[in-house]
Image: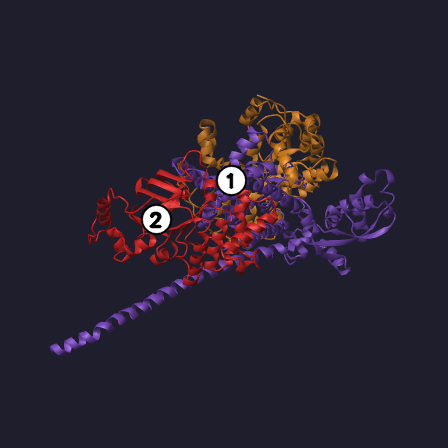
Amino acid sequence: MFRKTSLLAAAMLLSFGLGSVDARSSRNYISIVGSSTVYPFATTVAEQFGRTTPYKTPKIESTGSGGGLKLFCAGVGVEHPDITNASRAIKSSEVQKCKANGVSGIVEVKIGYDGIILANSKKTQPLKLTRKDIFMALAKDVPDPNGGEKLIPNPYRTWKDVNSSLPDIKIEVLGPPPTSGTRDAFVELAMEGGGKTFDFIKAMKKTDKKRYKAVCHTIREDGAYVEAGENDNLIVQKLDANPDAVGIFGFSFLDQNADKIQGSFVDGAPPTFDAIADGKYPVSRPLFFYVKKAHVEAIPGIKDYLAEFTSEKAWGPEGYLAEKGMIPMPENERKKFYKNVQTLQTIPMP
Amino acid sequence: MIDSQIPVIQDKEHDKEKELEMLKGLKTVGEITAPNPRMTCRNVNVYYSGVQAIFGVSLDIAGNEVIAMIGPSGCGKSTFLRCLNRMNDTIEGCRVEGEITLDSENIYGSKIDVVPLRAQVGIVFQKPNPFPKSIYENVAYGPKIHGLTQNKAELDEIVERSLIKAGLWGEVKDRMDKPGTGLSGGQQQRLCIARTIAVSPEVILMDEPCSALDPIATAKIEDLIDELREQYSIVIVTHSMQQASRVSQRTAYFHLGYLVEVGPTPQIFTKPRHRLTEDYITGRFG
Amino acid sequence: MNRVAVNETISVMKPKRAIETVSKGLRKRYRAERRFRMLGLAAVIASLLFLTIMFISIFGNGYTAFFQTYVKLNVYFDPETLREDTLARADYPGLVKKTMRAMFPEVQGRRDKRNLYKLVSSEAAFQLRAMVLRNPDIIGQEIPVWVPADDDIDMLMKGHIRRDVPESERRLNDKQLAWLDRLSADDRIQTRFNWTFIRSGDSREPELAGILGAAVGSFLTLLVTLLLSFPIGVAAAVYLEELAPKNRWTDLIEVNINNLAAVPSIVFGLLGLAVFLNFFGLPRSAPLVGGLVLTLMTFPTIIIASRAALQSVPPSIREAALGIGASKMQMIVHHVLPLALPGILTGTIIGMARALGETAPLLMIGMVAFIVDVPQGFNDPSTALPVQIFLWADSPERAFVEKTSAAIIVLLGFLITMNAAAVMLRKKYERRW
């Protein structure tokens, strides 16, 4: 299985001299990078693809959405990845960077949704929150409870302070750090959604967009929100140990640990598969992957990988990705992106 | 001539400085030359990082003689000994001036390589230091690296001959493959001597070879030195005046880096001509 | 008191008082000694305790991963589905489903059927395919086949999923439990040694995930590291210790090597990314690049250990060799290096063990990745043991918790083997002088 030592010297020489040329000129596996949220789904598809086709199983690096797009946009050629997964849409600045490096044909494929869950231990009652409650509990600055359009540093200590119908428990939220895609989506969907319920903040969006973003997206730093690292399993364990704490993570972790933790209702919708799928649960985000069109012909197997990913048995409501906790798209959306993949429809370049 | 006015001063450094001042320009008493010298030293000065340790020493070493170097601690006798096969080269910051010849060739000359020099002028150290290898390997190492033998049989013969000469053969012939470090102190030292003579040197330097040994082992080594004199010149540094008087033909007395007196051993010990020598051998200091 | 009495007292007291002082102090001295010994003992006990707790918790969580639940299916290799010409592409998942339906004929309804199929791993279909391809004669026969159970079933059997919670909180519903109980009653469920874990690469299905890919990746990476860092480290140490003149430049080099040994490993990862990947264009995720990066990290450690080992060789051995006319190189090669070797090897193995446990630098060069195929060479994409642990620890499936601990057991096994090797080498080559 391993080459012997005698061959090693030759291998070294090859890798230093000829090897570099070799590495650039061919690659017989698909190279995928990107979001750690999409990683469990992409790897499932990749494995299925590897077992059912003559191609090698794609290599999938978990680099985070931003890191993945950075690698993806670095250029065209076998040393650059073919596909990047993202738990958010590509930004226009990233498209520009791609273009500058010669990556002009990018196919965007939306694959489904991920619900962001606020959960606590099964040992207590589930919380019934609104996005406004979430904003009030976690924003750094909140509107003055005495009225007016003034913002004051968040004075709330317990959930009851935020909303009298909530239990009298200290606010203690374990969530992802700012580097995480889950955090981006959480502030955008839950916090901003809550901030908007105040008219003067909503009005700010038109007058002072920067300030609006800062108000809605800044999480308090006085200890009520604890950055618990990227490892969601760890958050689940901590919740099990501390019934008063609330954790923030992706739906698949709730799905796998339903015996230990329960999701909070948001705006009256329970965090269930069905509620997220039909859009009732407000804090959910789309998941994507991006394909380099120039690589589709050059790297063997990309077409078949795309076909596997966009097949009903993978991303359909009964597919194996749903099994893994991904929330599928409605049928018309699936049809639309399936067609995009078939025709390799690229996103418009600036 | 300098009197034995050894000032009793508490401050040792001052004491030494004062003494050095008095010794300045001292001329060696006695006959420094020898007929048919193997090695000659003329006006040797040694400095350690700029501090002078040996002051203008001149001395001949004759063939087939044992010359003993005595003197109080720190008198430079070991330093001088190590000049004779350039072991001082290994010490950082050591500089040797003057002329030392072996068979009329300056060993500090630019053409001289220390490797063959040390094959010609072997050395035995104060503490027995056999290699952590077998007894055989210890003795065979020198001939091997110098390529003195053509085959195993010749090497075996050299090893046997050297061990016989060192008086160790009878004790070790049945355990040649046992580690040399497993021998007793005296045996180890004789092994080191065997190792040195295996490369057929002309001169053997011995740096207090018995100071780490018990009296019986010492006696054996002293007998050995006497036998070796038939083939080699031997320079021995010793702390023991009895040993010097037992094994050597000539004795040189060193004091604070100066060669104070040199002469036939009986004369040095019975009728020393210099006051410092007399003080030393009568035990006034040392 | 009169004068005589005072004098007497003094003459009697004087020696006594000294002894009293000594014995009084003695008690205090012994007390201090005892205190120190107790403290030391307590420190040892505490560290042993932590070690034991760590081992117990890891082994307790992980040993079950070495076992896997299997389900016996009576498979009728239907000639209808398995036509001669399409054996490789036949509908094996369909065959599995058909078998399951035949075993539970009462199960009706699409949802229930799906739940029934979920009892066995997706591996079952591949297993049947391999059987048919190996021996097409079995077509037309009914053969009992043991196939791996799905990871949820496995977790239930191992007690990691509780049966006594309400149905909605379980990943297995009441019907599935009933089916399982029937299978159990029929002796169709068995726990066996999990060879898959030892023999295969990573997988998204916990019941199929194995450690071999990561272990081979670590092996190849460390091989590159050893082959590069050992000669470079020892050569550098010998040069600096034995041959280089002692001056300001060598002092500067020494200080910088010590600095290098203290640099956080992620920095080496960034360096590797910039130099090996971007400049030399070596392939991403390859053990070769991993080995190069870990070499940068390891060889300062080797240099420092080797220099200490060289320094500890007694000068008398050097003098002995020089004294009979060995050249400097001969002195080093024949005498100094062999004596320093145990120390050098110990330092090397400690450095390698540290390299074995590194993830941070590998992140930057793309070795934190999902790789199913076991790497076959130095340029194949691969991952490493600590990376595998990291990736599994972050997976949502419950079954990966035990896999994570099992991977830690394997990593600890590697580390203990390496340290044992260090001890043995030291024992073997250690010489007294």
Side (left or right) of C258 relative to C146:
left
Which quarter of the figure is the C terminus of chain A placed in? Answer: top right
- Say the numbered circle drawn on residue C106: none
Would you call the spot at circle 2 few (<14 residues within 10 Å), some (14-19), or many (20 or more)?
A: many
Q: Identify the image quadrant of residue C379.
A: top right
Depth check, front residue: A317 or B135: B135
Cα distance, mark 2 to mark 1? 37 Å
Q: Which residue is identified by label 1? A: C235
**Callout 2, which amino acid?**
Lys
Q: Can residue A51 be seen?
A: yes
Where is residue B262 drawn, in percent x and y? 31, 48
Shown colour of chain B = red
Q: Identify the image quadrant of residue C185.
A: bottom right
Indicate the chain on which mark 2 is placed. Answer: B
**Callout 1, which amino acid?**
Ala
Q: Which chain is purple?
A: C
Q: Secondary structure at mark 1?
A: helix
On whether disc 2 and disc 1 are found on a single subunit, the reply is no
- Say the numbered circle drawn on residue B77: 2
Indicate the chain on which mark 1 is placed. Answer: C
Shown colour of chain A = orange
Side (left or right) of C217 relative to C241:
right
Q: Secondary structure at mark 2?
A: helix
Residue lying at the far top in this picture: please name it.
Answer: A350
